[in-house]
């Protein structure tokens, strides 16, 4: 429901795409894929059965498949669908050859590099704040669950048995033994040698190492969804603009490989990485008056303004209506505050505290509401309601 804030300036965009290609080129497989793409391009170009206009399109965009926009991906898709055997050949390039029945993709080889790219993309000013599909969950790549522990001692003292056991090689008995003790200082721990038969210094180093490894593992706080599923479109499985950083619920529980006709027909308006994305403007959240007298709170609903079928399909796919019901209170709280802090009240407080009413409003409702670019969790809901009740 939110557009990925990729750079608009051409120079920044190019820099980002170069970074992405560099990330891919960490693997030798990249050159191999590029070679196969170029061979296929040549084969299509010299095929007299392929229309000139189609061959030109392939020639122009195939070699750039890793960084072409959504609209160009659709162009390649539409063009090659006229020549199914070439489309199949293209898809094959991105599939791994395996002995088993299960299909695997070269994407799995590149996944760590692509993940690193997305973690670093924030350096280029691309903020990843919440899931681009639901705008409910955080996808901040640096919010690590395990970072709640300051250091090894803190971890040893506070970690649950389950967390301790996650440290590889620690063993059940050692984890139990650590769990029962209260450690003050690392030195004391080594000096007292409470845990027999092992060199404690080595154990600590081991835990430190594992803690770091675990952090790295956990640092992937978002999942990367292929908007056009790789099972259906292997050819776009390494295309930058086909990735959507998203929460686990949206990607792994709800979307998986689902890609129905309505979604497919509306890719350009609903893919968060598309330059023609309109979904954030196609509907708005709003509050309705309670239908029953005994019900005091407003009812959270949504109003579709355009692109009806696509909006309905997205709501359906990501179960947004049900998931947003939980945030009805959030919207109602804004209404309560707006009644409490009327314009005249704000004026009075502002004079009393000698701060502008604008500053006051930011303190009351949260500064994020007044930041157009903010994409924190629930930002669309909050902004839509704020507009409805005239706060912004
Ligand atoms: Zn989500």
Image: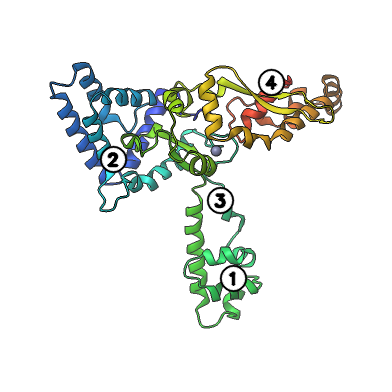
Q: CA distance from mark 4 to mark 3?
A: 34 Å
Please name the residue that numbered disc 2 is placed on: 94
N-terminal of the pair, mark 1 or mark 2, is 2
- Tell whether 56 sits left or right of 246: left
Residue at 63% from the left image edge and 26% from the top image edge: 371
N-terminal of the pair, mark 1 or mark 3, is 3
The N terminus: image quadrant: top right
Residue 39 lies, in percent from the top left, at 17, 33
Q: CA distance from mark 2 to mark 4?
A: 46 Å
The C terminus: image quadrant: top right
Determine the image quadrant of residue 386.
Answer: top right
N-terminal of the pair, mark 1 or mark 4, is 1
In the rendered structure, are the residues bearing label 2 and label 4 in contact, judged by CB atoms less than 8 Å apart? no
Determine the image quadrant of residue 365.
Answer: top right
Please name the residue that numbered disc 1 is placed on: 186
In the rendered structure, are the residues bearing label 4 and label 3 in contact, judged by CB atoms less than 8 Å apart? no
Residue at 41% from the left image edge and 41% from the top image edge: 117
Q: CA distance from mark 1 to mark 3?
A: 23 Å
Residue 144 marker: 3
Q: CA distance from mark 1 to mark 4?
A: 55 Å
N-terminal of the pair, mark 2 or mark 3, is 2
Q: Nearer the viewer, residue 214 or 227?
A: 227
Mark 4 residue element:
helix
N-terminal of the pair, mark 4 or mark 3, is 3
Residue 59 lies, in percent from the top left, at 22, 24
Q: Indicate yes or no: mark 3 CB to ligand 1 under 8 Å.
A: no
Residue 387 marker: 4
């Amino acid at each position: 429901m939110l557009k990925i804030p990729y750079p608009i300036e051409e120079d920044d965009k190019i820099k980002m795409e170069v970074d992405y290609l560099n990330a891919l080129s960490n693997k030798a497989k990249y050159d191999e894929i590029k070679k196969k793409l170029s061979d296929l391009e040549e084969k299509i170009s010299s095929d007299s059965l392929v229309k000139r206009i189609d061959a030109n399109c392939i020639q122009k965009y195939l070699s750039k498949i890793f960084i072409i926009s959504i609209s160009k991906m659709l162009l390649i898709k539409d063009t090659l669908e006229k020549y199914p055997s070439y489309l199949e050949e293209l898809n094959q390039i991105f599939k791994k050859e395996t002995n088993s029945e299960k299909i695997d993709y070269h994407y799995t080889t590149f996944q760590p590099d692509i993940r690193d790219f997305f973690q670093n993309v924030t350096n280029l000013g691309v903020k990843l704040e919440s899931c681009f599909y639901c705008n409910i969950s955080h996808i901040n790549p640096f919010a690590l669950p395990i970072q709640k522990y300051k250091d090894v001692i803190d971890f040893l003292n506070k970690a649950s048995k389950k967390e301790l056991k996650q440290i590889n090689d620690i063993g059940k008995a050692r984890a139990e033994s650590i769990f029962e003790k209260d450690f003050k200082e690392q030195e004391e721990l080594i000096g007292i040698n409470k845990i027999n038969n092992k060199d404690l210094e080595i154990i600590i180093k081991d835990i430190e190492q594992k803690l770091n490894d675990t952090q790295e593992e956990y640092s992937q706080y978002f999942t990367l969804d292929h908007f056009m599923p790789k099972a259906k479109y292997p050819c776009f499985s390494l295309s930058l603009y086909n990735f959507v950083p998203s929460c686990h619920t949206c990607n792994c529980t709800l979307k998986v490989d689902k890609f129905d006709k309505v979604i497919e027909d509306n890719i350009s308006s609903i893919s968060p990485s598309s330059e023609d994305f309109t979904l954030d403007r196609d509907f708005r959240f709003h509050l309705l008056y309670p239908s029953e007298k005994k019900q005091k709170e407003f009812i959270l609903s949504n109003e579709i303004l355009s692109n009806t079928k696509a909006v309905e399909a997205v709501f359906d796919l990501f179960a947004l209506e049900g998931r947003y019901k939980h945030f009805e209170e959030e919207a109602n709280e804004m209404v309560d505050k707006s009644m409490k802090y009327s314009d005249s009240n704000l004026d009075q407080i502002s004079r009393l505290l000698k701060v502008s009413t604008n500053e006051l409003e930011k303190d009351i409702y949260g500064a994020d509401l007044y930041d157009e670019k903010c994409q924190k969790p629930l930002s669309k809901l909050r902004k839509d309601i704020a507009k409805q009740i005239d706060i912004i």
